[in-house]
Image (spheres, coloured by chain):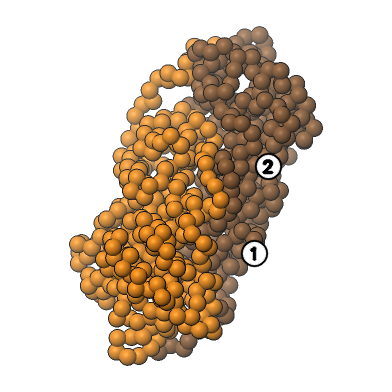
Chain colours: A orange, B brown
Amino acid sequence: MSDPIALSCPVPARRYERIVLAHGGGGRLMRALIDELFARAFASPALCVDHDGAIVELQGRVAVTTDAFTVRPLFFPGGDIGTLAVCGTVNDLAMCGARPRHLAAAFVLEEGLPVATLERIVASMAQAAREAGVTIVTGDTKVVERGKGDGVYITTTGLGTVIGPPIGPARIDAGDVILVSGPVGDHGIAVLSVREGLEFTTTLRSDVAPVAAQVAALLERGVDVRCLRDPTRGGLASALCELASGAGRAFVVREDAIPVRDEVADACELLGLDPLYVACEGRFVAVVARADGERALAVLREVGCGGAAIIGAALEAGASRVILESSVGGERVLDMLSGEQLPRIC
Amino acid sequence: MSDPIALSCPVPARRYERIVLAHGGGGRLMRALIDELFARAFASPALCVDHDGAIVELQGRVAVTTDAFTVRPLFFPGGDIGTLAVCGTVNDLAMCGARPRHLAAAFVLEEGLPVATLERIVASMAQAAREAGVTIVTGDTKVVERGKGDGVYITTTGLGTVIGPPIGPARIDAGDVILVSGPVGDHGIAVLSVREGLEFTTTLRSDVAPVAAQVAALLERGVDVRCLRDPTRGGLASALCELASGAGRAFVVREDAIPVRDEVADACELLGLDPLYVACEGRFVAVVARADGERALAVLREVGCGGAAIIGAALEAGASRVILESSVGGERVLDMLSGEQLPRIC
């Protein structure tokens, strides 16, 4: 018979420097990881570590969204996979016209990941969650063998309460104004710059940030928002194509009007990329009623989107396509991204 | 200038036999995968494929839980990673005393995964969701390079509405009765049997199944349920240790009373495993008020838990530990799983 061990006062687990399989095994080491790392970083009254899930109070229309984050490398100028895992999901809730409230976070860790790396990532998540006004209420940890992952993958799922009337591509009407909340392509180029060891873009940072407050400002000030979309994978062009397709009508956008930083444009030219297909993680497209276009732009600029711009308009119902009026007077049709321009960007 | 292509009527994408990076790229191929595979399998009024998230109606106390599934191999007797990804999360909601309502599903696919494999897994998810009465409302797909994953990892997040009064380890009182809903260890041994190419257990199937209806029966018939827990990773022993720790008291369980199939016991003996630490995926532990113990057992047997049993009781407050009264009259203390007995079991 072994000695009775009081579970409420366990012998402290040896501090591991790297993740081992037992950190995902459901036993003592996993418990220590949860208590010493996750529970401390994500502390809140709603965080539940003693149960299989959390209980939250929600009323009415609830937005729910989920995203797996597999960005490579884990750290990039302006953020890391943790920042991204919080902001990406918070922003998807905002794109549903919702106020982000709670997040769940599931980790797939690769055996051998330095615990210090995980700590940095978790600290970034906690910081981003504070900025976005959300609480991380529940989570999960699995560990896969060395060579079966890539350090860490994080899936976050968000819950938010819908602010205004329903929005969506079907609400887009002829004459509606299309805005973008800031310059596009920063995130993709920032990630690419470290991945490929490029020097020219070292001053460029990812735009990764929560946009929920900016969206809430539009909705709460009564702007007639028809639809929102964040141009992540596939960039602005793919986001516009998706919206046009959902709306069943054509959009026309002016190339001159689309804000792109010089560094991003230069890097894209060098690499043969089109900035309109490069991901952002802190920008959004808003389609608003024609009469509200200028007001929407003013609101956005007031709440921190200095680079926001009106870039185009929706046309009469008909063939869904996105027509780009180029700066030299020509027209071309923007298509959805074909193939894969920048894998593992988020 | 390229020809205008009507996005609402795209040229059908070449049918890919294996997953390529572009299936996660946010462009045309990802769209095709969503439309042709996920949207068809998970079709429901709430499923949202044209938006960044879904809107669901929920009122009051909402249970939320998330789990990453990394089981190896992907297919095992009695189920696959898809069955597991639905049942595991549905069961965690049930363990919160909630009726499962909606799921979100995020996929991390490894480049080269046969599309037919993904189709089988997605079909299993759809089938399990139907059985459990939940709708899959939103999702995400990422693709990682060959050698950076293991076929497919799935994270599901569940939302459920809480049925009765709050439950949790803190509600456990002296004299409360501990039940288990069926024989333990089937899932772990079933997975191990294929992983290790063992022959002796080919007749054994995983117990993976939704238990929400069984839990709802207990709650709706007024059984005073103090706490619920599903003995997944770490098995029955770890689940009991966690509950005892949360309750701040000791439990005593009788080894004779714990249901273990002969095949599981035999396999464990051969492999040097303790069945009390082997995972189940379709069983749960219920701690109920002493007066309700026999009634709880009767309800469970009525709703399909033929192998349910009363296995022990909670003692007075004091040192948290789980005492196992062995069949030969001795006593030993069950500890939480140390190290990792069966990696990647769920």
Helix, strand, or loop for circle 1?
Answer: helix
Query: In this orientation, which residue lies closer to the viewer: B295 or B108?
Result: B295
Measured as percent of width and height from the top left, residue A7 is found at 47, 19
Regarding residue B168, the answer to whether it shows in the image is yes
Query: Which residue matches tag 2?
Result: B209
| The quadrant where residue A35 appears | top left
Name the mark on residue B167.
Answer: none
10 Å neighbourhood of mark 2: few (<14), some, or many (≥20)? many
B329 on left or right of A194: right
Q: Residue at x 69, y 32 (%)?
A: B219
Query: Which residue matches tag 1?
Result: B40
- Marks 1 and 2, Cα distance to the nearest angstrom? 23 Å
Helix, strand, or loop for circle 2?
Answer: loop
Amino acid type at image mark 1: Arg
The chain that hosts pointer 2 is: B
Regarding residue B112, the answer to whether it shows in the image is no
Measured as percent of width and height from the top left, residue B53 is found at 51, 58
10 Å neighbourhood of mark 1: few (<14), some, or many (≥20)? few
